[in-house]
Amino acid sequence: MTEDEGGVEKLRFGEKLGYGLGDAASNFFFQVFNIFLLYYYTDIYGLAPAAVGTMFLATKAVDAVSDPLMGMVADRTHSRWGKFRPYLLFAAIPYGLLGYAMFAGPQLSDGGRLVYAYVTYTAMMLAYTAINIPYSALMGVISPSSRERTKVSSFRFICAFAAAWLIGTFVTPLKNILGAGDEATGFRRTMLIFAVASVLLFWLTFATTKERVVPKTQPADAKADLKALWRNGPWIALFFAGVFALMNVAIRSGGTLYYFKYWAGDDGTAIFLIFDKTAVFMSTGLFAMVLGITLTEPLSRRFGKRPLMITLTVLNALTLGVFYLIPAGAFAAMVVVNCVGSFIVGPTPALVWAMYADCADYGEWKTGRRTTALIFSAVQFAQKMGLAVGAGLSGFILSSFGFAANQVQTPTALSGIRLMFSVFPAICAILSAVSVAFYRLDEEEVKQIEAELRGRREGMPEAP
């Protein structure tokens, strides 16, 4: 075992990689939902865009209760495996089964299909809550060192976006090959593969990780936990940043297939090996994002998490806005601009999740209560809310601009699709950067908090 300059155990490569594989498991569904779910519901399962948008928003009422509740339950869990790791073991199979069920596509009436979508989507979001809140909270207790957690966060998002690259690269050719021309069958068989992979990867994360931060025993008090959460100013800033950031992701990702199918003229014809324009665009962008993620730790050490996060988010917003100006036939320009923007934004997911873990330390330092899972659950709810609002807005945008599935689109509808892919997500990115500006923890304060908490846990006097 090696230690850093603060005397904290450095994590082994295998454990950092093992933790990262858990987000790869999440992204086998998360990225499919972001990129393909709206398209699947409208163009394959035959649901109206406005109805889908309403569903995405209405089901968040369940998450508003389930997410913080799951956070408080996880914080109070005691087992031989720790507080958070048991959920990776036992919730993985329901997570995989429900993710597959969303794309099973049973033949029902119009109303029956909508009900089936509501039930399976809501159940999947509950399963996502049950496994991903403990998974995210695990990063807050895997090490007491902010620097080690930043490294873990980098591994997490390298694995996450490696999985996202696989999704962006192979979903469209896989569904075509496995479905033999039937998109519904292709999606169903593809999601079966992803479901099995997700379960196995979560089990690997369970097997390779360890919980090291053990807070002092505290009485169960939900009211005190919630009060401590709302006194956590840095967390509040990140809550709003998460809403706007995921609105950006949802609107942009939800518009991708429409942009290429109806604006860029992608009819599924392969332009490189088995890959069509959409697959090439997404795979190159995600590869650039993975390269950007590898710079997270050295850049954050040099510039600090907060200023780096703001700068990269604003630059990404500019690249998003450029897409409204790119002509339909300029596919090469689309790929280049997307790669530049993706590389720029690459470090931001790892940065922000490391900042969430710092918020858990800050909350314990300020209030004396450790609410790691509650903090991560509330942030995850913010992100799910952002995704839902973004996806809901996507459905309403399509409907309000006169989109009709599988038809030649009017100029007005094409304008709406282009706005959905460029200007609207750029606005959300700017709002996210503004929210991060209110995050007031700097690197020196984080180090001081770490030292004081270490002293408390070891029964030593606090650092001056």
Image (cartoon, rainbow, N blue to C red):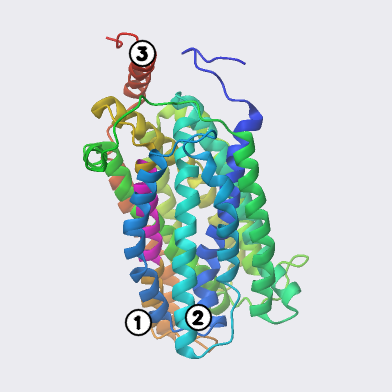
Towards the viewer: 39 or 91: 91
Return the residue at label 2: 42
Towards the viewer: 84 or 448: 84
Label 3 sits on what residue type? Gly
Return the residue at label 3: 455
Residue at x 45% of width, y 35% of height = 78
Relative height, residue 4 to residue 311 (above, below) = above
Looking at the rendering, the stretch of residues picked out in magenta corresponds to: 375-390
In the rendered image, which quarter contains the C terminus?
Answer: top left
Disc with the residue nearer the chain's start (2 vs 1): 2
Mark 3: secondary structure: helix
- Mark 1 and mark 3 in contact (Cβ < 8 Å)? no
Return the residue at label 1: 400
State the image coordinates of residue 409 (x, y, percent, origin top left).
Answer: 48, 86
Label 1 sits on what residue type? Ser
Task: Measure the C-alpha gap from mark 2 to mark 3.
Answer: 56 Å
- The number of numbered discs placed on residues in the rendered structure image is 3
State the image coordinates of residue 279 (x, y, percent, origin top left).
Answer: 65, 65
